[in-house]
Image: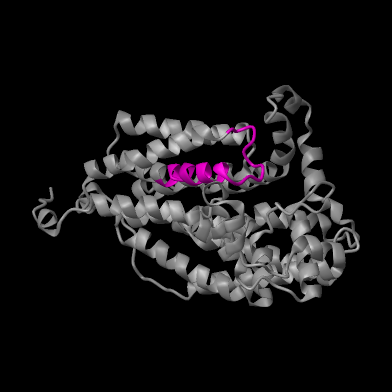
Amino acid sequence: MFRDLLFYTFAFSAFIPIYQAYRSPSRLYELPFLYGVACYVFIIPTLFFVKDDSYLLTDVEFNRYLLNAIICFWGALAGYYSINTQQKYTQISRQQIVKYNESKMFFALLPFIIIGIIGSTLIDPSEFGNEKGGVFAIILFFSRFFRPAAIILLILYLLRPDIKKVTFLLIFLFFSLQFILISGRRSEVFNLALTIMFPLFFIKNIVIPRAFIIPSLILAILVIAIFPTAREFTKRGDYDRLYSLSLTDLSREYLSGEKTNEVIEAAKNMDVVSRADVFYYGTSFYNSLIHQYASSTLFGNEFKQSLRINSNADLTSLRAKYWSGSVSGFKGYLSHTGFAGMYFEFGWFAVIFFFFFGRITKQFFVKAYCGKDIHWISFYCSFTTFILISIYHSMVSIPTMIIPYLLVLYTIKSISKKKDSQYNKVKYA
């Protein structure tokens, strides 16, 4: 009974911002709607399938996961709505970005685009997704320049179309589709959608038809459920086997926990961490940075390991000690899902971080939506991927992954900004 109560409370809470998006187009591009969609795509379907299965997830495991998710979800929305603004949106025009030199902006983008292309070329799509370090971590860092550069490029194209911008955008599309169709990267599907949708809204005020929301949700759920199995064949180039796959069976097997499922694993991990009363206390943020940027290829593995902060909250050993199931099935590389990921760090105090994340995100949105600054628009369009990451992966990875984005965005801003004397001479039509 309590399982059902928690489940429907969470499902209703996530549905409210989706419903509100039908009343105001801008809500489609804000954190509450994105959080609601992310929960319905990544979390709720699995919980629906297992809510009556106390063997797969015990009452304690199920209830703890959901209660933490509800509290963190409400905390993020509370933080978001704690900032109120009465400013209204008006479509940006070329006259409103004259304080930036478009030509300098484009040429400043070129090094990042070229580096991003080289990095993406060096990634083998048939191997992408496997846990790697060393040289691969360096290549991955440089390949991450491509998406923020592509967002700025798309914004410039929407303001003034030309063939050079189209060419680079098509190259970006090629690599994105390669990682989707061969690597089976689910995150790339959503990142590509965000990369296109948000600039179209902020620059051209093109809004997704509301009739597409529900079909898009269903399609996204299928992507989450089917890609893990499909990529076993696409990485080998065995595309003919895809025709023999049953969408219904694959979806049922994934969502019901018959195959490895991130939500179920996260709920079990929350249970063992709670029983051991051992948390990471924020060390994962630091260790994530060390894992990415202290290259063992350049500095040696011994030096890299010396920089890490060790924690007693080792999930592999905790699962072996406290979970009655076999630890042999534990896959440490799986996403913890955002709500559980922060629970591993700070227990029930995770809600505080979601509150401030919601509040900060609202500030970013207001600056992009009302400020008419092309760089704030570029930043928010880029930041949307981290909104989803905070749900389907973990906030822990955001500081690590956002650094390439900041390098691109702030370099472009610094180079392209006109001097005040130049800006004051601009004549408006």
Q: How far across and down, in percent of the image, does residue 304 sit?
A: 58, 57
Query: Which range is magenta?
Result: 124-148
Q: Residue at x 58, y 55 (%)?
A: 291
Q: Residue at x 79, y 27 (%)?
A: 244
Q: How far across and down, in percent of the image, does residue 327 sit?
A: 85, 56
| Viewer can see residue 62 | yes
**Depth check, front residue: 87 or 133:** 133
**Depth check, front residue: 17 or 280:** 280
Total tally of numbered discs in the picture: 0
Q: How far across and down, in percent of the image, does residue 295 sit?
A: 54, 51
Q: Is residue 136 part of the magenta span, yes or no? A: yes
Q: Is residue 143 left or right of residue 49?
A: left
Q: Residue at x 61, y 52 (%)?
A: 301
> Image quadrant of residue 190?
top right
Q: Is residue 200 part of the magenta span, yes or no? A: no
| Viewer can see residue 58 | no
